[in-house]
Image (tube, rainbow, N blue to C red):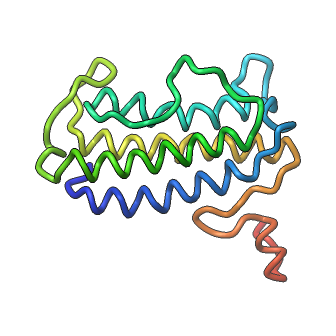
Amino acid sequence: MYRSLEDFKKDWKYESDSTLKVLNSLTDESLNTKVYPEGRTLGFLAWHLAVTIPEMMGNAGLKVEGPGVNDQLPDNAADIAAAYSKTSDSLLNELSKNWNDEMLHEEDEMYGEKWKKGLTLMYLNLHQTHHRGQMSVLMRQAGLKVPGIYGPSKEEWAAFGMDPLP
C-alpha cells in the first residue's frame, strides 16, 4: 500500500513508460491475437489497461480523463497507445491536484470491498503489470518483439551480442 503520493508517482512513471513500450510494439494486425477461441485478444488487453485507469480511480473518487468501459476498442494499435498515454498523464495530474498523502488512508467501496486509496494505487500498478505479462505471451505468438521491462528480453540480449538465457 502506498503511503506517499511521490512514491506512487515515481513507480507509476516507470510502470507507465514500460506499458507504453509494450503498447508501442503492437501492430494493428497483432490486435486479434489470442491463445484460445474464448480468450482475450491482445487488443482487448491493451485497451483494458487504458480503460481501467479512469474506471478504478473513478471508484476512488478521482476524475481521470480517458476512455470509458463501454467505449469501442479501437482497431488501430497507435490509437490504443495514445489513449493509454493520455489517461496515464491525466492520472498523475489529477492526483497532484486533488489528493494528498493523508488521503491515502481513506477507504472507498471497491468491487464489493473497502480499499484504502493507497491500496487502490498499488492494485492499479499491479493490475497493469499482470496484464503486460499476459500481453508478452500473445506478442510472441503474434511474432512481435517483446521489449524488456525488468531486464533485457531475448531480442535485447542478442542485440548486446550475448546469448539469451535458456
Quarter of the rendering containing residue 153: bottom right
- Picture coordinates of residue 58 (x, y %)? 34, 29
Q: Is 75 rendered above or below residue 95?
A: above
Q: Residue at x 30, y 62 (%)?
A: 7
- Picture coordinates of residue 75 (x, y %)? 77, 30
Q: Is 28 rendered above or below residue 15?
A: above
Identify the residue at the far left of this view.
Answer: 102
Relative side of 2 to 156, left or right: left
Q: Is 110 rendered above or below residue 155?
A: above
Quarter of the rendering containing residue 148: bottom right
Q: Residue at x 76, y 40 (%)?
A: 138
Which quarter of the rendering shows the C terminus? bottom right
Relative side of 102 to 129, left or right: left
Quarter of the rendering containing residue 53: top left
Q: Residue at x 77, y 71 (%)?
A: 156
- Picture coordinates of residue 46 (x, y %)? 64, 37
Relative side of 122 to 43, left or right: left
Seen from the viewer's position, the closer of residues 72 and 103 is: 72
Q: Residue at x 81, y 66 (%)?
A: 155
Count all numbered tags in the image, as a single digit: 0
Seen from the viewer's position, the closer of residues 97 and 159 is: 97
- Picture coordinates of residue 100 (x, y %)? 17, 51
